[in-house]
Image (cartoon, rainbow, N blue to C red):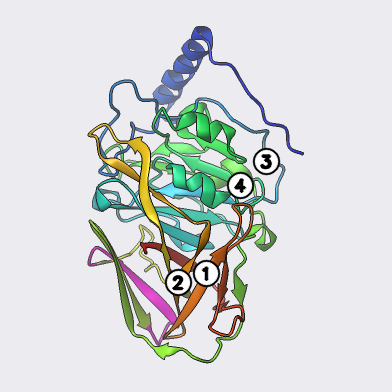
Amino acid sequence: MRQVARVRRSAMTAALLTAAVVGSLSTGCTVRGGGVDDGRGRGQGQGESEGTGQDNRTAPSGGSVLAVKIDNVSAARPQTGLDAADIVYAEQVEGGLSRLMAVYATQLPKSVGPVRSARESDLELLRQFDDPTLAFSGAQHKLLPLIDKAPLHARPADSGTDGFYRGADKPAPHNLYLHPQQLVGTAAGSGALTTGFHYGAAPAGGSPESERTVRFPSARFTFTWSTSRSRWLVSMDGTPTVLTSGKRVAPATVVVQHVKVRASKFHDYLGNNTPYTETVGAGKAEVLRDGQVFDVGWKRATATGGTEFTTADGAPMNFAKGQVWVIFAKA
């Protein structure tokens, strides 16, 4: 069993942490995450903390995925390092906007970002992985105790964690980036992807599909099939998703997973409720691959288990080899 390190906060500890953060700002290395995030890129409100200020688990010994929360408002684009992720999850946040979680196992990009804050839903989603590391800018102060108790390695930007830095390409808070290798060393390998996904040849029963759009209240994702690339070209809010490297984001498989999105007990500083995306349960999904769409069912019986996607005859739904995007659409 992994040992969970618990550190009591005291006035002296807080003072030392503040001094350390100020020192890191002066050197341009590890920095604060830029304030509590309401999904619109606004700054920190009164009485809200940017991160846990402590690591809630022992250091990872290898073999676990790195999950990074990625800013996805227009001011944060173009993003960096998304093309290296094995899985990209898209969830709804305050105001009907969207946020991404990029999961890295087989390769680590040189840099990834912009990095933004965590949400309660992330804790349930990440329980399917063994010993995951979560890199994020911070979180609402009332959420911090839940992050501290979660079975993951919390790495907020303001905890003295190596690898975070501010870029000069965008204004704060949309310019916080991470060097993943400084945080976790090496890639864990494909064995760390304990999601329950199956890969292989496409089953029978698909229907031709050239384009699919998924809408959140204030965001939308469009996936257009490219025959020449055998990939789905991503556009967000009507604009092609091109990274700072100039590469177009183009996953091999897109999953539109219909889930319950309910109100959580958390709010941003403007009073907007933070949605909670339930990823444990069962429901319907559409899987896009090879220029086709497959109507499937999904099931995740427990938080520690992966998600099973099955066709109408109960057989596992195979994904195409390559990056997978999972869009959590409200059922």
Of pointers 4 and 2, the one earlier in the residue sequence: 4
Q: Residue at x 41, y 34 (%)?
A: 139
The quarter of the rendered structure image containing the N terminus is top right
> Which amino acid is tagged 1?
Trp
Q: Which mark is residue 269?
A: none
Circle 2 is placed at which residue position? 284
> Within 10 Å of the Cα at label 2, are there few (<14), some (14-19), or many (20+) other Cα atoms?
some
Mark 4 to mark 2: distance in Å? 27 Å
Q: Going by the image, does 89 lie left or right of 214?
A: right
> Which amino acid is tagged 2?
Lys
Of pointers 2 and 3, the one earlier in the residue sequence: 3
In this rendering, which labeled residue sits more in front, label 1 or label 3? Answer: 1
Of pointers 1 and 4, the one earlier in the residue sequence: 4
Position of 10 relative to 68 (above/below): above
Q: Which mark is residue 132?
A: 4
Mark 1 to mark 4: distance in Å? 23 Å
Position of 49 relative to 65 (above/below): above
In this rendering, which labeled residue sits more in front, label 1 or label 4? Answer: 1
Q: Which mark is residue 298?
A: 1
Q: Is residue 268 visible?
A: yes
Quarter of the figure with residue 270: top left
Mark 2 to mark 3: distance in Å? 35 Å
Circle 3 is placed at which residue position? 60
> Which amino acid is tagged 3?
Pro
Please give the range of residues in magenta: 226-238
> Could you tell me if the residues under marks 1 and 2 are in contact, i.e. CB atoms within 8 Å?
yes
Label 4 residue SS: loop
Q: Residue at x 40, y 87 (%)?
A: 227
Of pointers 3 and 4, the one earlier in the residue sequence: 3
Q: Position of residue 13 (x, y in %)?
A: 53, 12
